[in-house]
Image (tube, rainbow, N blue to C red):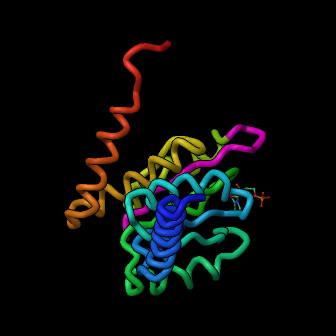
């Protein structure tokens, strides 16, 4: 490999390393909760969307049913730690987003997950049918829902953060530019 190519590869690597370190050091602004580690493949879409917009997040496996104490402990100081929005994804009889919303004033974005005998319809109805007074903004089932929850969290942060707003606008532009005018 030539000197220039090596230097450019080195600089790419070091900027990748630096941005990973920056991400780790930045205080997370979005909490990404999921009911099981088996939900990560889908919920990672939320993290990826945030990451692409330079927004640090904190992903945790927390189940409203299996680890209720972990949920209340996470929420007790979430605001103090700088969390501004919470994304909560769960499958089956999904109460994570609703119980999260009951314990915090932060906006809660619920992602119903598939994989059940009812293909996520159970999680969708459990998440969306909140009693009046405790809102959960509910997204579509699965990966598209997780990605959109990440983008919605960014849109919420963009209201008071010009940098995020600009990156979100650029993302939309690039997304439009990537759509071909003709199918083939
Ligand atoms: N879940 C975990 N605790 C409460 C609920 N509703 C959900 C998880 C996962 C599904 O149950 O979010 O989508 C199955 O979990 P597991 O760990 O058995 O794969």
Q: Classify 105 as above or below 124.
A: below
Q: Residue at x 37, y 64 (%)?
A: 107
Total marks shown come to: 0
Q: Which contiguous range is marked in magenta?
A: 98-119
Which quadrant holds residue 34?
A: bottom right
Camera-nearest residue between 82 and 35: 82
16 drawn magenta: no
Q: Which residue lies at the image location 46% right of the left edge and 49% below the top edge?
A: 138
Task: Answer with left or right where residue 23 lies relative to residue 90.
Answer: left
| Whether residue 55 is situated above or below residue 83 in the rendered picture | above
Residue beneath the point at 60% across and 58% down: 1
Considering depth in this image, is 171 or 32 the residue closer to the camera?
171
Residue nearest the viewer, comparing 178 with 118: 178
Percent x, y of residue 25: 46, 83
* Residue 159 image position (x, y, % from top left): 21, 61
Q: Residue furthest front?
A: 2
Q: Residue at x 40, y 66 (%)?
A: 55
């Amino acid at each position: 490999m030539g000197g220039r190519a090596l230097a450019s590869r080195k600089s790419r690597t070091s900027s990748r390393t630096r941005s990973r370190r920056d991400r780790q050091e930045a205080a997370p602004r979005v909490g990404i909760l999921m009911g099981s580690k088996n939900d990560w493949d889908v919920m990672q879409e939320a993290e990826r969307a945030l990451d692409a917009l330079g927004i640090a997040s904190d992903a945790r496996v927390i189940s409203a049913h299996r680890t209720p104490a972990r949920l209340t402990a996470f929420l007790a100081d979430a605001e103090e730690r700088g969390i501004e929005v919470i994304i909560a994804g769960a499958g089956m009889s999904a109460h994570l987003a609703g119980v999260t919303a009951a314990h915090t004033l932060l906006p809660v974005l619920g992602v119903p997950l598939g994989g059940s005998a009812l293909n996520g319809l159970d999680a969708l109805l459990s998440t969306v049918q909140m009693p009046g007074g405790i809102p959960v903004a509910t997204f579509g089932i699965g990966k598209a829902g997780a990605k959109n929850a990440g983008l919605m969290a960014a849109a919420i942060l963009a209201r008071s953060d010009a940098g995020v707003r600009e990156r979100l606008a650029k993302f939309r532009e690039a997304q439009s530019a990537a759509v071909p005018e003709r199918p083939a």
